[in-house]
Amino acid sequence: MKKLFAIVLLMALAMPTNAQDVYSVGYYDETNGTVAALYKNGNRLYTAQYSSQTSKATRVTCNSQGDAFWLVNFYDYPDGTYNHTEIRLNDHVYASTENHREVHIADMYCLKDTIYYAGYQYNEDSVLMATVWKGSNFETHWVMGDGVHPSSIAFSDIDKRTGIPYFCGYIIDDKKRAAIWKAQELLSTFEQDSIYEAPITSSYASQIAVENGHVYTIGEFEQQGFPIPALWKDNVLVRYVQPYFDVLHCICAFDDSYYYGYTSRWQYYDAILKDYNSEVLQLEYAYCIQSTFTDIYVLGKDFDNKFYVWKNFEKQCQIENCNALYDMCVFDPFFEPHSEWYYEILNDDGTITYQHLECAADTTIGTERPKIIVRTNTIYDRNEHTEVTHEYVYEENGLVYWWNKDLEDFTVLYDYDAEAGDEWEIKVGTESILVHVDSVGVFEYDGDTRKMLHISDAGGLFSGDIVVGYGHLTSFFPEKLMNRGKGYRVEGLRCYWIGDELVYHDGDEDCDAIYAELHNGINEDGPSTGSGTFTVYPNPTNGILFVETRLIASLPDQTYRITNLMGQTLLTGNISAETQQIDISTLPSGMYFISVGETTQKFVKR
Protein backbone atom coordinates (compact mmCIF):
# COMPACT_ATOMS: atom_id res chain seq x y z
CA MET A 1 0.00 0.00 0.00
CA LYS A 2 1.59 3.21 -1.24
CA LYS A 3 0.33 5.81 1.19
CA LEU A 4 1.89 8.12 3.74
CA PHE A 5 0.12 10.25 6.30
CA ALA A 6 2.10 13.05 7.91
CA ILE A 7 0.00 14.75 10.56
CA VAL A 8 1.40 18.17 11.30
CA LEU A 9 -0.14 21.34 12.63
CA LEU A 10 -0.12 23.04 9.26
CA MET A 11 -3.12 23.85 7.15
CA ALA A 12 -2.71 22.90 3.52
CA LEU A 13 -4.34 24.79 0.68
CA ALA A 14 -4.42 22.02 -1.93
CA MET A 15 -4.66 22.52 -5.62
CA PRO A 16 -5.92 19.91 -8.09
CA THR A 17 -3.23 17.92 -9.80
CA ASN A 18 -3.81 18.87 -13.42
CA ALA A 19 -3.30 22.56 -14.06
CA GLN A 20 -5.15 23.77 -17.13
CA ASP A 21 -5.16 27.39 -18.19
CA VAL A 22 -2.30 29.88 -18.02
CA TYR A 23 -3.11 33.60 -18.21
CA SER A 24 -0.42 36.17 -18.98
CA VAL A 25 -0.46 39.95 -19.40
CA GLY A 26 1.60 42.52 -21.28
CA TYR A 27 1.07 44.62 -24.36
CA TYR A 28 1.48 44.73 -28.12
CA ASP A 29 2.33 47.61 -30.44
CA GLU A 30 -0.08 49.50 -32.62
CA THR A 31 0.56 52.50 -34.86
CA ASN A 32 -0.31 55.01 -32.14
CA GLY A 33 1.30 53.23 -29.20
CA THR A 34 0.90 50.16 -27.06
CA VAL A 35 -2.27 48.22 -26.18
CA ALA A 36 -2.62 46.20 -22.97
CA ALA A 37 -3.57 42.58 -23.53
CA LEU A 38 -4.59 39.48 -21.59
CA TYR A 39 -3.51 36.14 -23.08
CA LYS A 40 -4.88 32.68 -22.33
CA ASN A 41 -2.65 29.72 -23.17
CA GLY A 42 -0.75 31.95 -25.57
CA ASN A 43 -3.76 33.35 -27.41
CA ARG A 44 -4.81 36.98 -27.06
CA LEU A 45 -8.09 36.98 -25.12
CA TYR A 46 -8.92 40.62 -24.26
CA THR A 47 -7.45 44.08 -24.81
CA ALA A 48 -7.83 47.37 -22.93
CA GLN A 49 -7.47 50.73 -24.70
CA TYR A 50 -9.02 54.19 -24.84
CA SER A 51 -8.58 56.77 -27.58
CA SER A 52 -5.55 59.05 -27.23
CA GLN A 53 -4.03 56.73 -24.63
CA THR A 54 -1.58 53.87 -24.56
CA SER A 55 -1.89 51.03 -22.06
CA LYS A 56 0.16 48.27 -20.45
CA ALA A 57 -1.04 45.30 -18.36
CA THR A 58 1.33 44.40 -15.53
CA ARG A 59 -0.43 42.04 -13.09
CA VAL A 60 -2.90 39.15 -13.33
CA THR A 61 -4.51 36.76 -10.86
CA CYS A 62 -7.22 34.08 -11.14
CA ASN A 63 -10.07 32.98 -8.92
CA SER A 64 -11.29 29.41 -8.50
CA GLN A 65 -13.85 29.80 -11.31
CA GLY A 66 -11.25 30.67 -13.94
CA ASP A 67 -11.99 34.41 -14.04
CA ALA A 68 -8.93 36.59 -14.64
CA PHE A 69 -8.38 39.91 -12.84
CA TRP A 70 -5.73 42.01 -14.55
CA LEU A 71 -4.17 45.39 -13.79
CA VAL A 72 -3.92 47.94 -16.63
CA ASN A 73 -2.06 51.26 -16.50
CA PHE A 74 -3.10 53.97 -18.98
CA TYR A 75 -0.89 56.77 -20.27
CA ASP A 76 -1.81 59.89 -22.23
CA TYR A 77 -0.53 59.83 -25.80
CA PRO A 78 1.81 61.09 -27.13
CA ASP A 79 3.70 62.56 -24.14
CA GLY A 80 3.32 59.37 -22.05
CA THR A 81 1.94 61.08 -18.95
CA TYR A 82 0.42 58.64 -16.46
CA ASN A 83 -3.35 58.87 -16.49
CA HIS A 84 -5.06 56.20 -14.38
CA THR A 85 -5.20 52.50 -13.48
CA GLU A 86 -7.97 49.96 -13.94
CA ILE A 87 -8.52 46.47 -12.62
CA ARG A 88 -10.35 44.44 -15.22
CA LEU A 89 -12.34 41.27 -14.65
CA ASN A 90 -12.15 39.32 -17.89
CA ASP A 91 -13.42 41.82 -20.49
CA HIS A 92 -14.93 44.57 -18.33
CA VAL A 93 -13.79 47.14 -15.77
CA TYR A 94 -14.01 45.81 -12.21
CA ALA A 95 -12.45 48.78 -10.35
CA SER A 96 -10.58 51.98 -11.16
CA THR A 97 -8.04 54.10 -9.28
CA GLU A 98 -8.84 57.21 -11.28
CA ASN A 99 -10.24 58.77 -8.11
CA HIS A 100 -7.47 57.36 -5.93
CA ARG A 101 -4.49 59.38 -7.11
CA GLU A 102 -2.44 58.43 -4.05
CA VAL A 103 -3.05 54.69 -4.50
CA HIS A 104 -0.18 52.75 -6.08
CA ILE A 105 -0.82 49.06 -6.77
CA ALA A 106 2.21 46.80 -6.85
CA ASP A 107 0.50 43.40 -6.83
CA MET A 108 -2.84 41.58 -6.78
CA TYR A 109 -3.97 38.22 -5.50
CA CYS A 110 -7.15 36.17 -5.00
CA LEU A 111 -7.79 34.61 -1.62
CA LYS A 112 -11.01 32.62 -1.16
CA ASP A 113 -12.16 34.20 -4.45
CA THR A 114 -11.90 37.74 -3.04
CA ILE A 115 -9.60 40.10 -4.94
CA TYR A 116 -6.94 41.94 -2.92
CA TYR A 117 -4.51 44.68 -3.99
CA ALA A 118 -1.13 45.19 -2.33
CA GLY A 119 0.67 48.48 -2.71
CA TYR A 120 1.11 51.77 -0.94
CA GLN A 121 -0.50 55.14 -0.38
CA TYR A 122 0.32 58.42 1.38
CA ASN A 123 -1.51 59.20 4.62
CA GLU A 124 -2.65 62.64 5.77
CA ASP A 125 0.88 63.47 6.91
CA SER A 126 2.29 62.52 3.46
CA VAL A 127 3.89 59.42 4.98
CA LEU A 128 4.23 56.40 2.71
CA MET A 129 2.13 53.55 4.13
CA ALA A 130 1.98 49.99 2.84
CA THR A 131 -1.67 49.08 2.30
CA VAL A 132 -3.82 46.13 1.27
CA TRP A 133 -7.22 46.87 -0.29
CA LYS A 134 -9.96 44.49 -1.35
CA GLY A 135 -13.01 44.45 -3.60
CA SER A 136 -14.18 46.73 -6.36
CA ASN A 137 -14.52 49.75 -4.04
CA PHE A 138 -10.94 49.60 -2.77
CA GLU A 139 -11.95 48.91 0.81
CA THR A 140 -8.88 49.30 3.04
CA HIS A 141 -8.17 45.83 4.44
CA TRP A 142 -4.82 46.32 6.19
CA VAL A 143 -2.36 49.17 6.69
CA MET A 144 1.22 48.16 7.42
CA GLY A 145 3.21 50.46 9.68
CA ASP A 146 2.21 52.93 12.37
CA GLY A 147 3.35 56.22 10.89
CA VAL A 148 6.52 56.06 12.96
CA HIS A 149 7.82 53.19 10.84
CA PRO A 150 6.36 53.86 7.39
CA SER A 151 6.59 51.02 4.91
CA SER A 152 6.13 50.11 1.27
CA ILE A 153 4.94 46.84 -0.24
CA ALA A 154 6.49 45.61 -3.44
CA PHE A 155 5.21 42.07 -3.78
CA SER A 156 3.00 39.40 -2.17
CA ASP A 157 2.60 35.64 -2.10
CA ILE A 158 0.22 33.12 -0.52
CA ASP A 159 1.41 30.10 1.40
CA LYS A 160 -0.27 27.27 -0.52
CA ARG A 161 -0.31 25.08 2.59
CA THR A 162 -1.94 27.57 4.94
CA GLY A 163 -3.63 30.16 2.73
CA ILE A 164 -1.89 32.94 4.70
CA PRO A 165 -0.69 35.91 2.60
CA TYR A 166 2.86 37.22 2.98
CA PHE A 167 4.18 40.59 1.85
CA CYS A 168 7.60 42.12 1.42
CA GLY A 169 8.93 45.65 1.03
CA TYR A 170 10.69 47.90 3.50
CA ILE A 171 10.21 50.01 6.60
CA ILE A 172 11.88 53.33 7.37
CA ASP A 173 13.16 54.35 10.79
CA ASP A 174 16.84 55.15 11.20
CA LYS A 175 17.41 53.61 7.77
CA LYS A 176 15.50 51.79 5.07
CA ARG A 177 15.30 48.10 5.99
CA ALA A 178 13.89 45.18 4.01
CA ALA A 179 10.85 43.73 5.76
CA ILE A 180 8.45 40.76 5.62
CA TRP A 181 4.85 40.73 6.83
CA LYS A 182 2.80 37.63 7.61
CA ALA A 183 -0.66 39.02 6.96
CA GLN A 184 -0.60 42.29 8.90
CA GLU A 185 2.09 41.21 11.35
CA LEU A 186 5.63 42.48 10.80
CA LEU A 187 7.49 39.18 10.74
CA SER A 188 11.10 40.31 10.38
CA THR A 189 13.51 42.90 9.04
CA PHE A 190 16.91 42.22 7.52
CA GLU A 191 19.71 43.20 9.91
CA GLN A 192 22.90 41.73 8.44
CA ASP A 193 25.82 44.06 9.19
CA SER A 194 28.73 42.86 7.11
CA ILE A 195 29.49 41.42 3.72
CA TYR A 196 32.45 43.52 2.66
CA GLU A 197 33.30 44.27 6.32
CA ALA A 198 31.08 47.33 6.16
CA PRO A 199 27.55 47.96 7.49
CA ILE A 200 24.46 47.73 5.31
CA THR A 201 23.15 51.25 4.94
CA SER A 202 19.77 50.28 3.44
CA SER A 203 17.88 47.31 2.01
CA TYR A 204 14.55 46.43 0.47
CA ALA A 205 12.78 43.26 -0.69
CA SER A 206 11.01 43.25 -4.05
CA GLN A 207 9.66 39.70 -4.43
CA ILE A 208 8.64 36.98 -2.01
CA ALA A 209 7.90 33.23 -2.14
CA VAL A 210 6.61 30.90 0.57
CA GLU A 211 6.94 27.13 0.84
CA ASN A 212 6.39 24.81 3.80
CA GLY A 213 7.07 27.44 6.45
CA HIS A 214 10.09 28.99 4.71
CA VAL A 215 10.07 32.53 3.33
CA TYR A 216 12.31 33.49 0.40
CA THR A 217 12.81 37.09 -0.71
CA ILE A 218 14.72 38.86 -3.45
CA GLY A 219 15.79 42.49 -3.30
CA GLU A 220 18.84 44.66 -2.79
CA PHE A 221 21.02 45.98 0.00
CA GLU A 222 23.37 48.92 -0.19
CA GLN A 223 26.90 48.60 1.11
CA GLN A 224 29.94 50.78 0.48
CA GLY A 225 27.71 52.86 -1.78
CA PHE A 226 26.81 49.94 -4.08
CA PRO A 227 23.28 48.52 -4.52
CA ILE A 228 23.84 44.74 -4.41
CA PRO A 229 21.13 42.27 -5.57
CA ALA A 230 20.51 39.70 -2.85
CA LEU A 231 18.40 36.67 -1.90
CA TRP A 232 17.32 35.86 1.64
CA LYS A 233 15.89 32.68 3.15
CA ASP A 234 14.11 33.14 6.47
CA ASN A 235 15.84 36.47 6.99
CA VAL A 236 19.31 35.00 6.34
CA LEU A 237 21.31 36.16 3.33
CA VAL A 238 22.05 33.15 1.11
CA ARG A 239 23.08 34.77 -2.18
CA TYR A 240 24.33 38.12 -3.44
CA VAL A 241 25.71 38.94 -6.88
CA GLN A 242 28.02 41.37 -8.60
CA PRO A 243 26.47 44.88 -8.56
CA TYR A 244 25.61 46.41 -11.95
CA PHE A 245 26.49 43.20 -13.79
CA ASP A 246 24.22 40.51 -12.35
CA VAL A 247 20.54 40.58 -11.35
CA LEU A 248 18.34 38.28 -9.28
CA HIS A 249 14.61 38.26 -10.04
CA CYS A 250 11.31 36.27 -10.33
CA ILE A 251 11.43 33.83 -7.44
CA CYS A 252 9.08 30.96 -6.56
CA ALA A 253 9.17 28.21 -3.96
CA PHE A 254 8.29 24.61 -4.69
CA ASP A 255 8.66 21.25 -2.96
CA ASP A 256 10.83 22.51 -0.07
CA SER A 257 13.13 24.30 -2.47
CA TYR A 258 13.17 27.56 -4.44
CA TYR A 259 13.83 28.70 -8.00
CA TYR A 260 14.80 32.17 -9.17
CA GLY A 261 15.81 34.09 -12.25
CA TYR A 262 19.47 35.08 -12.60
CA THR A 263 20.63 37.49 -15.29
CA SER A 264 24.33 37.53 -16.13
CA ARG A 265 25.44 40.73 -17.87
CA TRP A 266 28.85 39.15 -18.32
CA GLN A 267 27.49 36.23 -20.34
CA TYR A 268 24.38 37.98 -21.71
CA TYR A 269 21.83 35.33 -20.86
CA ASP A 270 19.18 34.57 -18.28
CA ALA A 271 18.72 31.36 -16.32
CA ILE A 272 16.36 29.81 -13.83
CA LEU A 273 18.42 28.48 -10.93
CA LYS A 274 17.43 25.97 -8.28
CA ASP A 275 18.64 26.78 -4.79
CA TYR A 276 22.07 28.40 -5.01
CA ASN A 277 23.50 27.71 -8.45
CA SER A 278 21.99 24.62 -10.08
CA GLU A 279 20.79 25.79 -13.50
CA VAL A 280 17.62 24.14 -14.83
CA LEU A 281 16.56 26.41 -17.73
CA GLN A 282 18.48 28.89 -19.87
CA LEU A 283 16.67 31.57 -21.86
CA GLU A 284 16.98 35.17 -22.92
CA TYR A 285 14.90 36.53 -20.05
CA ALA A 286 12.50 35.19 -17.41
CA TYR A 287 9.68 37.58 -16.56
CA CYS A 288 7.79 35.50 -14.03
CA ILE A 289 8.01 32.12 -12.32
CA GLN A 290 5.16 30.58 -10.34
CA SER A 291 4.35 27.24 -8.75
CA THR A 292 1.13 25.38 -8.12
CA PHE A 293 1.01 22.45 -5.73
CA THR A 294 2.42 20.11 -8.37
CA ASP A 295 4.04 22.13 -11.16
CA ILE A 296 6.33 25.07 -11.93
CA TYR A 297 5.52 27.58 -14.67
CA VAL A 298 7.91 30.11 -16.25
CA LEU A 299 6.94 33.08 -18.41
CA GLY A 300 9.86 34.27 -20.51
CA LYS A 301 11.55 34.98 -23.82
CA ASP A 302 13.64 32.36 -25.60
CA PHE A 303 16.65 33.03 -27.80
CA ASP A 304 14.42 33.12 -30.90
CA ASN A 305 13.06 36.43 -29.50
CA LYS A 306 9.62 34.91 -28.93
CA PHE A 307 7.62 34.62 -25.71
CA TYR A 308 6.69 31.26 -24.20
CA VAL A 309 5.26 29.55 -21.13
CA TRP A 310 7.27 26.64 -19.75
CA LYS A 311 5.70 23.98 -17.56
CA ASN A 312 8.20 22.04 -15.46
CA PHE A 313 10.88 23.63 -17.67
CA GLU A 314 9.46 22.28 -20.93
CA LYS A 315 7.78 24.60 -23.44
CA GLN A 316 4.04 24.63 -22.98
CA CYS A 317 2.82 27.30 -25.43
CA GLN A 318 3.96 30.37 -27.34
CA ILE A 319 2.48 33.79 -26.56
CA GLU A 320 1.34 35.13 -29.91
CA ASN A 321 1.48 38.72 -31.17
CA CYS A 322 2.93 40.48 -28.14
CA ASN A 323 5.82 42.86 -27.53
CA ALA A 324 6.25 42.62 -23.77
CA LEU A 325 5.01 40.44 -20.91
CA TYR A 326 5.02 41.01 -17.16
CA ASP A 327 3.03 38.47 -15.16
CA MET A 328 1.00 35.25 -15.27
CA CYS A 329 -1.33 33.09 -13.19
CA VAL A 330 -2.33 29.46 -13.47
CA PHE A 331 -5.94 28.34 -13.14
CA ASP A 332 -6.51 24.97 -11.45
CA PRO A 333 -10.19 23.92 -11.52
CA PHE A 334 -11.65 22.27 -8.43
CA PHE A 335 -13.35 19.33 -10.15
CA GLU A 336 -11.88 18.26 -13.47
CA PRO A 337 -14.35 17.04 -16.10
CA HIS A 338 -14.51 13.24 -16.15
CA SER A 339 -13.02 12.79 -12.69
CA GLU A 340 -13.91 9.34 -11.35
CA TRP A 341 -14.01 7.94 -7.83
CA TYR A 342 -14.32 4.28 -6.83
CA TYR A 343 -15.43 3.49 -3.29
CA GLU A 344 -15.69 -0.01 -1.86
CA ILE A 345 -19.15 -1.28 -0.84
CA LEU A 346 -19.45 -3.98 1.82
CA ASN A 347 -22.75 -5.83 1.46
CA ASP A 348 -24.56 -7.61 4.30
CA ASP A 349 -23.84 -10.99 2.69
CA GLY A 350 -20.10 -10.28 2.92
CA THR A 351 -19.57 -9.60 -0.77
CA ILE A 352 -17.65 -6.55 -1.95
CA THR A 353 -18.88 -4.38 -4.79
CA TYR A 354 -18.12 -0.78 -5.74
CA GLN A 355 -19.61 2.67 -5.84
CA HIS A 356 -18.67 4.72 -8.89
CA LEU A 357 -18.81 8.53 -8.99
CA GLU A 358 -18.16 10.49 -12.15
CA CYS A 359 -17.97 14.25 -12.61
CA ALA A 360 -19.84 14.11 -15.89
CA ALA A 361 -20.73 17.66 -16.95
CA ASP A 362 -21.86 21.13 -15.91
CA THR A 363 -25.46 22.14 -15.44
CA THR A 364 -27.46 25.11 -14.14
CA ILE A 365 -29.62 25.16 -11.00
CA GLY A 366 -31.01 28.60 -10.19
CA THR A 367 -28.13 31.04 -10.37
CA GLU A 368 -25.44 28.41 -9.71
CA ARG A 369 -23.39 26.37 -12.16
CA PRO A 370 -22.76 23.02 -10.41
CA LYS A 371 -21.08 19.84 -11.60
CA ILE A 372 -23.18 16.74 -12.24
CA ILE A 373 -21.87 13.80 -10.21
CA VAL A 374 -23.28 10.51 -11.49
CA ARG A 375 -23.45 8.22 -8.44
CA THR A 376 -23.72 4.49 -9.19
CA ASN A 377 -24.01 1.96 -6.34
CA THR A 378 -23.42 -1.56 -7.63
CA ILE A 379 -24.98 -3.89 -5.03
CA TYR A 380 -24.99 -7.71 -4.90
CA ASP A 381 -25.74 -8.90 -8.45
CA ARG A 382 -24.74 -5.92 -10.57
CA ASN A 383 -27.15 -6.85 -13.35
CA GLU A 384 -30.19 -6.51 -11.09
CA HIS A 385 -29.27 -4.33 -8.11
CA THR A 386 -27.72 -1.09 -9.29
CA GLU A 387 -28.77 2.31 -7.98
CA VAL A 388 -28.03 5.40 -10.08
CA THR A 389 -28.60 8.98 -8.90
CA HIS A 390 -27.40 12.38 -10.01
CA GLU A 391 -25.87 14.65 -7.37
CA TYR A 392 -24.93 18.31 -7.91
CA VAL A 393 -21.96 20.05 -6.29
CA TYR A 394 -19.92 23.21 -6.72
CA GLU A 395 -17.08 24.90 -4.83
CA GLU A 396 -16.89 28.54 -3.81
CA ASN A 397 -14.68 30.31 -1.27
CA GLY A 398 -13.42 27.04 0.18
CA LEU A 399 -16.93 25.60 0.64
CA VAL A 400 -18.28 22.65 -1.35
CA TYR A 401 -22.04 22.96 -1.76
CA TRP A 402 -24.38 20.00 -2.39
CA TRP A 403 -27.90 20.22 -3.82
CA ASN A 404 -30.46 19.07 -1.24
CA LYS A 405 -33.31 17.66 -3.30
CA ASP A 406 -35.78 17.69 -0.40
CA LEU A 407 -35.08 21.29 0.62
CA GLU A 408 -34.48 22.39 -3.00
CA ASP A 409 -31.44 24.35 -1.94
CA PHE A 410 -27.64 24.09 -1.92
CA THR A 411 -26.22 23.24 1.51
CA VAL A 412 -22.63 22.82 2.71
CA LEU A 413 -20.99 19.42 2.24
CA TYR A 414 -17.33 20.31 3.00
CA ASP A 415 -15.65 23.35 4.51
CA TYR A 416 -12.08 23.14 3.25
CA ASP A 417 -11.06 26.32 5.07
CA ALA A 418 -12.12 24.99 8.48
CA GLU A 419 -9.59 24.82 11.30
CA ALA A 420 -9.37 22.60 14.38
CA GLY A 421 -12.37 23.30 16.61
CA ASP A 422 -14.64 24.53 13.82
CA GLU A 423 -18.00 22.93 13.06
CA TRP A 424 -20.49 22.89 10.20
CA GLU A 425 -23.85 21.30 9.51
CA ILE A 426 -24.44 18.80 6.71
CA LYS A 427 -28.08 18.43 5.70
CA VAL A 428 -29.22 15.09 4.26
CA GLY A 429 -32.83 15.34 3.19
CA THR A 430 -34.67 16.69 6.23
CA GLU A 431 -32.04 15.34 8.65
CA SER A 432 -28.69 16.90 9.50
CA ILE A 433 -25.27 16.05 10.93
CA LEU A 434 -23.15 18.48 12.94
CA VAL A 435 -19.53 17.65 12.18
CA HIS A 436 -16.64 18.83 14.33
CA VAL A 437 -13.06 19.34 13.09
CA ASP A 438 -10.88 17.45 15.57
CA SER A 439 -7.57 18.24 13.88
CA VAL A 440 -6.08 19.63 10.67
CA GLY A 441 -3.16 17.89 9.03
CA VAL A 442 -1.43 17.07 5.77
CA PHE A 443 -2.18 14.17 3.43
CA GLU A 444 0.72 13.02 1.25
CA TYR A 445 0.48 10.58 -1.61
CA ASP A 446 3.09 10.06 -4.35
CA GLY A 447 4.54 13.55 -3.85
CA ASP A 448 1.14 15.27 -3.84
CA THR A 449 0.51 17.16 -0.58
CA ARG A 450 -2.97 18.28 0.39
CA LYS A 451 -4.84 19.64 3.38
CA MET A 452 -6.68 17.02 5.43
CA LEU A 453 -9.47 17.53 7.97
CA HIS A 454 -10.18 14.86 10.59
CA ILE A 455 -13.87 15.24 11.45
CA SER A 456 -16.30 13.50 13.78
CA ASP A 457 -19.99 13.67 14.66
CA ALA A 458 -22.05 12.44 17.60
CA GLY A 459 -23.45 9.39 15.83
CA GLY A 460 -20.30 8.50 13.90
CA LEU A 461 -22.29 8.84 10.69
CA PHE A 462 -19.68 10.79 8.75
CA SER A 463 -16.58 10.61 10.95
CA GLY A 464 -13.27 10.26 9.13
CA ASP A 465 -10.83 12.20 6.98
CA ILE A 466 -11.60 14.75 4.26
CA VAL A 467 -8.80 15.48 1.78
CA VAL A 468 -9.04 18.70 -0.23
CA GLY A 469 -9.70 17.86 -3.87
CA TYR A 470 -10.34 14.14 -3.22
CA GLY A 471 -13.30 14.32 -0.86
CA HIS A 472 -14.12 12.12 2.14
CA LEU A 473 -11.87 9.06 2.25
CA THR A 474 -14.68 6.83 3.63
CA SER A 475 -17.62 7.97 1.49
CA PHE A 476 -17.86 11.10 -0.64
CA PHE A 477 -21.44 11.75 0.50
CA PRO A 478 -22.96 10.87 3.93
CA GLU A 479 -23.95 7.39 2.75
CA LYS A 480 -24.93 6.12 6.24
CA LEU A 481 -27.86 8.53 6.21
CA MET A 482 -28.59 8.22 2.49
CA ASN A 483 -28.71 4.39 2.55
CA ARG A 484 -30.32 3.56 5.91
CA GLY A 485 -31.75 0.05 5.92
CA LYS A 486 -30.51 -0.87 2.47
CA GLY A 487 -28.13 -3.60 3.55
CA TYR A 488 -24.75 -2.21 2.48
CA ARG A 489 -22.09 0.25 3.63
CA VAL A 490 -19.67 2.41 1.66
CA GLU A 491 -16.34 1.68 3.30
CA GLY A 492 -13.57 3.69 1.65
CA LEU A 493 -12.04 5.35 -1.42
CA ARG A 494 -10.07 2.84 -3.47
CA CYS A 495 -9.19 4.67 -6.71
CA TYR A 496 -9.46 8.22 -8.06
CA TRP A 497 -8.85 9.36 -11.64
CA ILE A 498 -8.66 12.83 -13.15
CA GLY A 499 -9.30 12.25 -16.83
CA ASP A 500 -7.23 9.21 -17.72
CA GLU A 501 -4.64 9.77 -14.97
CA LEU A 502 -4.81 7.63 -11.85
CA VAL A 503 -3.93 10.05 -9.05
CA TYR A 504 -4.84 7.94 -5.98
CA HIS A 505 -4.87 4.22 -5.29
CA ASP A 506 -5.49 2.62 -1.88
CA GLY A 507 -5.18 -1.09 -1.30
CA ASP A 508 -3.62 -3.99 -3.15
CA GLU A 509 -6.29 -4.65 -5.75
CA ASP A 510 -5.53 -3.33 -9.20
CA CYS A 511 -7.68 -0.31 -10.11
CA ASP A 512 -8.24 -1.70 -13.61
CA ALA A 513 -9.75 -4.81 -12.03
CA ILE A 514 -12.12 -2.63 -10.00
CA TYR A 515 -13.03 -0.76 -13.16
CA ALA A 516 -13.65 -3.97 -15.07
CA GLU A 517 -15.82 -5.44 -12.31
CA LEU A 518 -18.02 -2.36 -12.11
CA HIS A 519 -18.47 -2.31 -15.88
CA ASN A 520 -19.52 -5.94 -16.19
CA GLY A 521 -16.04 -7.31 -16.71
CA ILE A 522 -15.38 -5.55 -19.98
CA ASN A 523 -12.00 -5.95 -21.63
CA GLU A 524 -10.59 -2.52 -22.35
CA ASP A 525 -7.96 -2.20 -25.02
CA GLY A 526 -6.42 1.19 -25.61
CA PRO A 527 -5.59 2.52 -29.06
CA SER A 528 -1.99 3.21 -28.09
CA THR A 529 -1.10 -0.50 -27.93
CA GLY A 530 -2.34 -1.43 -31.36
CA SER A 531 -2.99 -4.95 -30.04
CA GLY A 532 -6.78 -4.93 -30.02
CA THR A 533 -9.39 -5.88 -32.54
CA PHE A 534 -10.14 -2.20 -33.12
CA THR A 535 -9.00 1.22 -31.98
CA VAL A 536 -10.92 4.47 -31.49
CA TYR A 537 -9.67 8.04 -31.87
CA PRO A 538 -9.53 10.91 -31.11
CA ASN A 539 -10.09 10.29 -27.42
CA PRO A 540 -11.44 12.56 -25.98
CA THR A 541 -13.47 13.67 -28.99
CA ASN A 542 -15.63 16.71 -29.68
CA GLY A 543 -18.17 15.01 -31.94
CA ILE A 544 -16.65 12.59 -34.46
CA LEU A 545 -15.30 9.19 -33.42
CA PHE A 546 -13.19 7.08 -35.76
CA VAL A 547 -13.19 3.28 -35.39
CA GLU A 548 -10.20 1.71 -37.10
CA THR A 549 -9.93 -2.01 -37.91
CA ARG A 550 -7.18 -3.67 -39.91
CA LEU A 551 -9.04 -6.86 -40.73
CA ILE A 552 -12.72 -6.10 -40.66
CA ALA A 553 -13.61 -9.65 -41.59
CA SER A 554 -12.00 -10.93 -38.38
CA LEU A 555 -14.52 -9.11 -36.17
CA PRO A 556 -17.08 -11.40 -34.49
CA ASP A 557 -19.77 -9.25 -36.08
CA GLN A 558 -19.82 -5.90 -37.83
CA THR A 559 -22.29 -4.07 -35.59
CA TYR A 560 -21.23 -1.44 -33.04
CA ARG A 561 -23.12 -0.37 -29.94
CA ILE A 562 -22.46 2.78 -27.84
CA THR A 563 -23.61 2.74 -24.19
CA ASN A 564 -23.38 5.09 -21.23
CA LEU A 565 -22.20 4.38 -17.68
CA MET A 566 -25.60 2.95 -16.75
CA GLY A 567 -25.45 0.41 -19.59
CA GLN A 568 -28.14 2.13 -21.67
CA THR A 569 -27.70 1.75 -25.43
CA LEU A 570 -27.60 5.16 -27.10
CA LEU A 571 -26.34 4.51 -30.65
CA THR A 572 -25.98 1.48 -32.89
CA GLY A 573 -24.76 0.94 -36.41
CA ASN A 574 -22.68 -1.16 -38.76
CA ILE A 575 -18.92 -1.23 -39.34
CA SER A 576 -18.56 -1.09 -43.12
CA ALA A 577 -14.98 0.13 -43.59
CA GLU A 578 -11.58 -0.35 -42.00
CA THR A 579 -11.83 3.26 -40.82
CA GLN A 580 -15.41 3.93 -39.79
CA GLN A 581 -16.56 7.49 -38.96
CA ILE A 582 -19.32 7.77 -36.30
CA ASP A 583 -21.12 11.02 -35.55
CA ILE A 584 -21.63 11.29 -31.76
CA SER A 585 -22.29 15.05 -31.68
CA THR A 586 -25.77 14.47 -30.25
CA LEU A 587 -24.40 12.79 -27.11
CA PRO A 588 -23.98 14.94 -23.97
CA SER A 589 -20.47 15.42 -22.59
CA GLY A 590 -19.35 12.41 -20.57
CA MET A 591 -17.80 8.94 -20.65
CA TYR A 592 -19.11 6.19 -22.98
CA PHE A 593 -18.34 2.67 -24.17
CA ILE A 594 -18.28 1.33 -27.70
CA SER A 595 -18.65 -2.42 -28.19
CA VAL A 596 -18.03 -4.50 -31.27
CA GLY A 597 -18.68 -8.18 -30.68
CA GLU A 598 -17.11 -9.13 -27.33
CA THR A 599 -14.65 -6.22 -27.25
CA THR A 600 -15.43 -2.94 -25.53
CA GLN A 601 -13.47 0.29 -25.31
CA LYS A 602 -13.97 3.49 -23.34
CA PHE A 603 -14.01 7.00 -24.82
CA VAL A 604 -14.86 10.50 -23.65
CA LYS A 605 -17.13 13.01 -25.40
CA ARG A 606 -16.20 16.64 -24.56
Image (cartoon, rainbow, N blue to C red):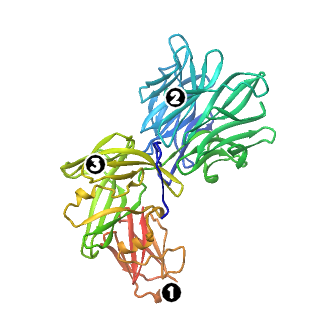
Task: Check if mark 3's residue and mark 2's residue have beta carbons within 8 Å.
Answer: no
Residue at the top extreme of this rendering: 125
Which is more toward the observer, 448 or 453? 453
Look at the image and tell me in which quarter the C terminus lies.
bottom left
Question: Three-letter amino acid code at disc 1?
Answer: Leu
Residue visible at 51% across and 16% down in the picture: 146
In the picture provided, is 435 more to the left or to the right than 240?
Answer: left
User: Which label is found at residue 457?
Assistant: 3
Residue 204 position within the rendered picture, expressed as x and y whole percent measured from the top left:
65, 26
User: Which label is found at residue 551?
Assistant: 1
Residue 351 position within the rendered picture, expressed as x and y whole percent measured from the top left:
30, 73
Residue at the right extreme of this rendering: 266
Residue visible at 47% across and 34% down in the picture: 88
Residue 333 position within the rendered picture, expressed as x and y whole percent measured from the top left:
44, 50
Residue visible at 28% across and 59% down in the picture: 390
In the picture provided, is 187 more to the left or to the right than 429?
Answer: right
Q: Is residue 79 visible?
A: no
For marks 3 and 1, give the CA distance: 60 Å
For marks 1 and 2, give the CA distance: 65 Å
* Label 3 or label 2, whichever comes before in sequence order: 2
Residue 159 higher or lower than 571, as above or below: above
Question: Three-letter amino acid code at disc 2?
Answer: Ala
Which element carries disc 1, helix, strand or loop?
A: loop
Residue holding disc 2: 118
Residue 528 position within the rendered picture, expressed as x and y whole percent measured from the top left:
54, 73
Q: Nearer the viewer, mark 3 or mark 2?
A: 3
Q: Residues within 10 Å of mark 2 (few under 14, many from 20)?
A: many
Q: Residues within 10 Å of mark 3 (few under 14, many from 20)?
A: some
Q: Nearer the viewer, mark 3 or mark 1?
A: 3
